[in-house]
Image (cartoon, helix red, strand yellow):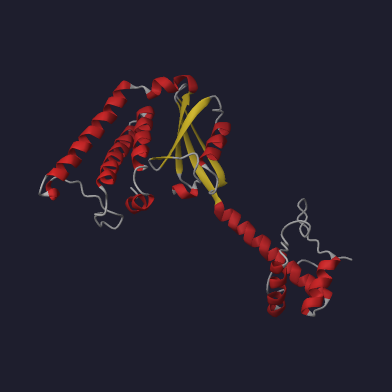
Amino acid sequence: MTSPPSTTTMEEFNNKELLDNVRPLLQRDKIRLWEPPYTNPDTGAENFPEELVESVCAEVGSTTEEIRLALSYLRRHALEKLAAKKRTDLLTLKVRSSGVSNNKNSCINVTMSSQSSGHELEKLIQEKLNLLDQNIKMICSGRMIQLNEPLQTQNIHTNATVLVLAVPKSAVASASADIQTSNLIQAIKEATTILHENARNKSNLSQYQLRITDQQGRELTALSDDERRSLMVAMTLHEKGRSFLRQRDYLSALSLFSEADNEFRQCSSQMLNSVDN
């Protein structure tokens, strides 16, 4: 038996009462019209078995033609919602790569789900830029992209720029052992710790203490000593890393961002969302 033409809009099918009666039956029986066997995975064509149509007819008291029209409408509506969700879920990212070993810069666009992990993005970038033999680090908005977390939870949005630092595997040890950068990181940590200790030991804290505010400019006063120190160190390292980025000193920036991330992890996620620098 040939099915009636598919119906996609309420103007073509305006029996809302019938839809309201059919929909709960499908939900009750866990029937997903957008999946096989009701939707052909290859052609996308609809297929409503006679037993399904007759079963629904018996419960709602409508004709088989009306039930087929209702099922067709509900199936198309579900597919349209899924397609819309998929479109909004996709991220288009601009990827800038600095190939440390050959001093080449590349720029590409990649598209993937916002639910994808940092590791999936890393793998895609390595394939697209032919960097499978290199270690890469990814930075977006001055923050290192974490491999085990979804992109969405890392506040990575469509049209964002991802800076990729490509380091040959043979050079990783020497890069991480850069004495000058290590000394700078240590000096920043020591200076920030001294500033923090001075603030704790002085009666007039406002003279010495760095004021940390949220996005509305309100001072965060409920920070523990350890959180305040870690946040001060992280923000200082982060800002210095941004300075190195502007100078195109990518390896130094990478080291500073990595250390900043270690310090940021000592702070609660709620507090970091408030600061969101």
Residue at 67%, 63% in the rendered image: 78
Q: Position of residue 192 (x, y in %)?
A: 22, 37
Total of numbered circles in the picture?
0
In the picture as drawn, the residue positioned furthest to the left comes out as 203
Q: Is residue 118 above or below residue 254?
A: below
* 178, 15: nearer the viewer: 178
Residue 157 visible: no
Q: Position of residue 88 (x, y in %)?
A: 55, 55
Q: Residue 163 appears in which quarter of the rendering?
A: top left
Q: Residue 35 appears in which quarter of the rendering?
A: bottom right
> Left or right of 116: which side holds 195?
left
Residue at 49%, 44% in the rendered image: 149
Residue 38 visible: yes
Q: Position of residue 206 (x, y in %)?
A: 14, 50
Q: Quadrant of the N terminus?
A: bottom right
Q: Position of residue 109 (x, y in %)?
A: 53, 40
Q: Is residue 95 above or below residue 131?
A: below
Q: Residue 251 appears in which quarter of the rendering?
A: top left
> Left or right of 202: which side holds 137?
right
Residue at 16%, 45% in the rendered image: 200
